[in-house]
Image: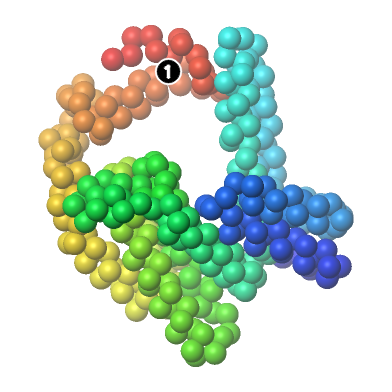
Amino acid sequence: MESIAPSSTRIRQIGLAGLYVFAFSAFYDKAGGVLGLLLMLIAMGFCAREVWNDYKFDPMAWTVALFVLYLVLHAYTSALEFPQTSEAQWTEARNWGRLIVFLILAWWMRGEPRVIFWCLALALLGLFAKLLIDTEATDITRMLKSQRTGFAYTLGFSTIISAASIAAMLIFTPRVLKYPAPTAARALIILTWFAAIIVLIQIQITTAFRGTWLAIAVVIALAMLFLPRSLAKNLLLYSSLGIILILLIVQNSTLVQNRVHNEEKTISLLMEGASINEIPLRGSVGIRLHLWNYGLKRWLERPLFGWGPGTEITKRDCK
């Protein structure tokens, strides 16, 4: 989406205001997120021709359009076959359909470092404001005692948003640092970046979701594979991040060791190449492996649309 910005400065200001409100409210307040999205959509409505000219040649936009079509067909056919699950089918389709919001955000960002910087900064500001206001003393106590906590959020949501924030900071930081700024401002940005990354990594470790740890490792590996130039140019920055990560893992070694130790036998069996039947049905890793194996078998029975949520038939013969 590299075409010229919307012709009207005022319309663009409304759209960017919506983008910034959405960025700040994404982790802080649902009402603010809805308001920001509404402002972006209104502004896009006034420059619909430019929006269409951008989207019609964008492969990602067509991919998303096909995905939405698939969601509708999936929900419709599954609801016909399993009418008792109709509400659950359409609810799940609507939840997945919300992913199209990223196309709206991308259109207003337009690859501009300045806009990306402010979106990332406001999103982190909203996240930390939520943590500051809603985190209780008991959460800090649990963290200091190497116990799991999600701070101002549930464990599951906290691990997702901290992981997404870490990934965004790793990917977009090089682009943000390219933006010309006075030395003092650049130093402040880097210091703030380090402070934010320390807090986010600490949150990620404290939530102690091993699956998320694995996902972050995969994202980092892919970034190193597909963005080698960025890695080389920002070697000092990423090396410092590695040192921070090691220090925080050492600081939280009791929690990390407990999480890994609980699944030591299962992990050892996996590394030895054990079959699924040899994996014990206990612990989160073992149970997940059996669930994934069962889910794969069921999916092979209906590879096009699957079973969908709420279908009791998927529970047959499940261990």
Residue 307's place in the image compared with 8, above or below, is above
Position of 284 relative to 134 (above/below): above
Examine the rendering and report whether any part of residue 15 can be seen: yes
Label 1: which secondary element: helix
Looking at numbered disc 1 in the image, what kind of residue is underneath it? Arg
Q: Nearer the viewer, residue 146 or 110?
A: 146
Q: Can the viewer see residue 26? A: no
**Quadrant of image for the C terminus:** top left
Q: How are the colours assigned in the image? A: rainbow
Kindly give the residue lying farthest to the bottom in the view shown: 183
User: In the rendered view, would you say 160 is above or below 76?
Assistant: below
Q: x%, y% of residue 85? A: 57, 14
Quadrant housing the N terminus = bottom right
Compared with 139, 283 (above or below) is: above
Residue at position x 84%, y 52% in the image:
45
In the foreground, 94 or 68: 94
Q: Return the residue nearer the eye: 155 or 302.
A: 155
Q: Name the residue: 71% across, 64% down.
A: 16
Which residue is pictured at 39% across the width and 22% down the height? Answer: 295
Residue at numbered disc 1: 298
Q: Whole-percent x and y of residue 187?
A: 45, 84
Asked where in the image residue 115 lies, by quadrant, the reply is bottom right
